[in-house]
Image (cartoon, rainbow, N blue to C red):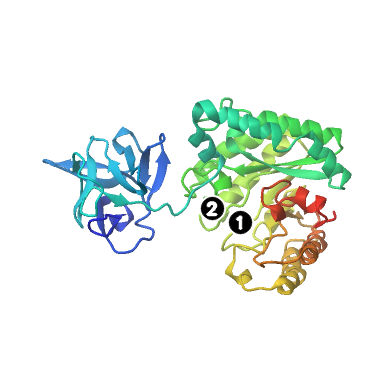
Amino acid sequence: MSVKLQKYLSAENGGDSFVVANRASASDWETFRLWRINESTFNLRVFDKKFVGLSKRGHRVRAVAHSNQPGTSEAFQIVRNTNDTNRIRILAPNGHFLQTKTETLVTADYQGDSGWGDDNPSVFLMTIVKTLQGEYQLTNGYGPEKAPQVMRGHWNTYIVEEDFKFMSQKGLNAVRIPVGWWIASDPPPKPFVGGSIQALDNAFRWAQNYSMKIIVDLHAVPGSQNGNDHSGTRDGYQEWGASNIQECVNVIDFLASRYAKNPSLAAVELINEPLAPGVTFENLNTYYKAGYQTVRKHSSSAYVILSNRLGPADAREFLQLGRSLQGSVIDVHYYNLYDNAFNNMNAQQNIDFIYNNRSAQLSEVTITGGPLSFVGEWTAEWEVQGASMQVYQRFAKAQMDVYGQATFGWAYWSYRNVNHHWSLKWMIKNNYIKP
């Protein structure tokens, strides 16, 4: 927001136009997604996915959002005020700062330093409305020298062989392991770092030691299938589509060929949580057929899991395809979260919802002669505040009672997590859950 005009910067019409400073409130057009180049230099991506650059006409250099791909001409440096880090200047690639001359004229021609006061046209207030915390952001943030050390430390300590022993002793018979598409590349494309395939190899070895099975889950795909942190997204946009199908098939081929003969391989999940309508039924249907055939090329016994779409999609839409694919599984995710319908439910209403609504939903995808059903993610966390241990136990038991009816079983998200009720290990050790 321009401190002088008290108006927000915006890509007019959402992009492919000049940047202006005439918006009294901030929404989509006033939100810029940052592609980090280094600690202070970024590309600025606008609502229609164009990048901010400069347009020179005569002696005037204006900020404009029209580039499809960023380059050096779209690299802006964010300079923070050391006394108030929300106050910033934006250094343009021509060496001058952006300034708001008028509400419709944002130029890159401010020189010098006239202080950080409210009358300075080059001073802006920057509000960070969302911070992504996926593997892309982690490795990009730490950089090429430190990121490998950080990731190695994570892989060596997060889940170890003793955890497989613990799970086996508690009656758990399989783990669902999320991986990113870059696992198939050595070295992986920047900023990702190598080492995840060795971590997956370790898991297969430990699983074999304790007679457990593994579901390899392609959790993050090129372009991102849902825009969430865990999907490998760079900036929160969902851009997976037809052009990414073959690349995903190649990753599935890599994984299936590597582990097909390992006795611990139970299944390959082709994609995690594709979001409708951005991920279309047609594209996903095409990918599922190709991915299935790719797994079958290497294994006749491994199950192939088809994830249902999130968002406005029919839970039964892939049952017909599943009927034609022997050894296929439909994956559904059930959380009493992320929906306003749960905001005002008390504990008993949540529990009743599991026994009634979730049971009915699971029955819809558990059909005779069709693919197996799998509740691939759930957790004993909810919107209820201050619930006692006994109430949490009832909530968890309700889900295990219902989700235990899935013909392929269920998987808790996750085995270990900093938030206690999301951590199956913590829930078991503290007697909230009894598998």
- Residue 350 is drawn in which quadrant? bottom right
Image: 154 above or below 429: above
Question: Residues under labels 2 and 1: Cα distance?
Answer: 8 Å
The amino acid sitting under disc 1 is: Arg
Image location of residue 111, percent across then percent down? 18, 39
CB contact under 8 Å: marks 2 and 1: yes
**Residue found at x 79% / y 34%:** 161
Horizontal side of residue 309 vs 357, given as left or right: left
> In the rendered view, would you say 341 is above or below 418?
below
Q: Say which quarter of the image contains residue 199.
A: top right
Q: Nearer the viewer, residue 370 or 203?
A: 203
**Which residue is under mark 2?**
279
Q: Which one is in front, 156 or 233?
A: 156
| Residue at 58% across, 34% down | 182
| Place of residue 35 in the rendered image (x, y in percent of width and height, measured from the top left) | 41, 41
Which residue is tagged 1? 309
Of the numbered discs 2 and 1, the one sitting upstream in the chain is: 2
Please say if 186 is above or below 57: above
Q: Position of residue 41 (x, y in %)?
A: 36, 37
Residue found 66% across the figure and 56% down from its top = 318
Percent position of residue 33, x then y: 40, 48
Task: Indicate left or right for 407 with 48 as reference.
Answer: right
User: Type of residue at label 2?
Assistant: Val
In the displayed image of the protein, which residue is found farthest to the left? 58
Q: Secondary structure at mark 1?
A: loop
